[in-house]
Image: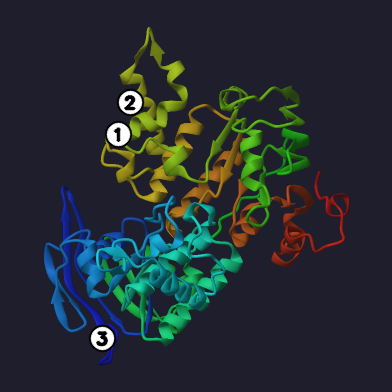
Amino acid sequence: MTNGENILLDVRGVTKRFPGVLALNKVDLQVKAGEVHAVVGENGAGKSTLMKILSGVYQADDGEVIFKGEKVAFANPRQAQAAGITTIYQELVQIPLLSVMENIFLGSEIMRGPFVNWPEMRRQSQVLLDRLRLDVDPDEQLSNLGVGQAQMIEVAKALHHKADLIIMDEPTAALSLREIDNLFSIIRELKASGVAVIYISHHLEEAFEVCDTISVLRDGEYIGTYSSESLTMDELIRLMVGRALDEQFPKVNIPRGDELLRIEHLNQGTRLRDISFSAYAGEVLGIAGLVGAGRTELLRAIFGADPIDSGDIYIAGQKAEVKNPRDAMQHGLGLLTEDRKQQGLMLHRPTRENITVTILDHITRFGLVNQSQEREIASRYVDSMSIKVADLEQLVQNLSGGNQQKVVLSKWMAIQPKVLIFDEPTRGIDVGAKVEIYKLINDFVAQGGAVIMVSSELPEVLAISDRIVVIHQGRVTGTVAREQATQEKIMELATGSTDETYEDVLAGE
């Protein structure tokens, strides 16, 4: 545990039970004032449950929480906030139609008699925005801001409430590299001013970069607390998963087969311009580029989710008409979307239905689903994908992020696709589940399929891809073979700062 007299938060033996689940078992945690403290663990380790107890969403069944020297048991988030604990969630809790100023002061407006003191709120908002180096008008409607700016508004709100402890849950999930650098700078300033930060992220390298201390949870139990300088990445992973991972990025080299997908001169307004490339059996084709380069737009256009202006799509050598996702599925394409919760899953439906939703036409007669056939198919994928689920009726919303991603993958495998398209395949899942997803990708291409993968994590793109297509401002600026690919090379092409043309770096076509 952390030593020293300046303990801001002291969690002692906290236990939390849900029906059939022991979510936390006698967990300890100590956080100093002015400390950036990472809490890490696999999905299901208990991180979110512990944070919800600290922020008043849940109440502990056993144990105690001591904050600023006093025992506390918050009945709701408002009590926690009043005491000095503010949580910035990955899925921001904001009102987009209100102004920046109104979101900062929501629920704690400054009053002048019976009226809201708008000038003073505007003045204080500007002070907070200046402190965060955020060039935003306090009267700007929040919906006009980008994700990174909206997240900074949550930090401004925490500063307004004079938080002593800020809990950040996956704060960099949707940020650009520049926004991440800015956030880290703000975190260091908060630390210098005596504010403590609990930092939760699946990006373990961030824990080493910005955190002083790292606490590890595994299967609802406290494993230990360590100085970030005393651990290596491999040691941290071993503590998290309870075993050493053979490889963080397992990659199987498969001989390249026939061309399965060819895109020729695809155009979509100014977002996609004259894009051409091919993907082959046995290959993982990475798509790299900065935020806003057109990566997700390209995947959606190929899958028929968004209309294109011109261009041709060839599947297994045959020109294909892909006007909508149903056409794409019939031609053997599957798309695992970036936001699996909103676009990839029916969260309030059973695992069974989520797996078979793409093949209902094949298991339905006279309007009735053959439930025994449905259960047999779902059970087969639960086994083959190693999906950790209580039973086939368990709601998908109650699965971990890694298991949710396996359910999405299962529903596409059910159509027996030729090409699987992944948009951010490991976003929001822990390191152990990432390795499992990589192995499933390897299995698919080993069986003769092709994978197209967009990822914002350059180490992931470099490690898993056989070739990498790089996009800048809606254009392909280069295709680089695995053997020649480096972070520097990819960033040059992604920023348009190289004089090389597409043909100059074309590799393996």
Residue nearer the viewer, 188 or 437: 188
Whether 373 is drawn above or below 156: the answer is above
- Return the residue at label 3: 7
The disc at residue 375 is: 2
Quadrant containing the N terminus in the rendered view: bottom left
Image depth: mark 1 or mark 3 in front: 3
- Return the residue at label 1: 392
Furthest residue toward left: 62
3D distance between C-alphas at marks 1 and 3: 45 Å
Q: Is residue 330 left or right of residue 352?
A: right
Q: Is residue 280 left or right of residue 219?
A: right
Indicate the position of residue 95 as horizontal and vertical percent values: 39, 52
Indicate the position of residue 296 as horizontal and vertical percent values: 61, 45
Nearer-N-terminus badge (2/1): 2
Alpha-carbon neighbours of circle 2 within 10 Å: few (<14), some, or many (≥20)? some
| Amino acid at dot 1 | Leu
3D distance between C-alphas at marks 2 and 1: 8 Å
Whether 209 is drawn above or below 240: the answer is below
Q: Are marks 1 and 3 in contact (CB under 8 Å)?
A: no
Quadrant assignment, res 305: top right
Report if residue 449 is visible in the image: no
Whether 72 is drawn above or below 436: the answer is below
Indicate the position of residue 42 as horizontal and vertical percent values: 37, 60
Image depth: mark 2 or mark 3 in front: 3
> What secondary structure is found at the residue carrying circle 3?
strand
Alpha-carbon neighbours of circle 1 within 10 Å: few (<14), some, or many (≥20)? some
Nearer-N-terminus badge (1/3): 3
Q: Are marks 2 and 1 in contact (CB under 8 Å)?
A: yes
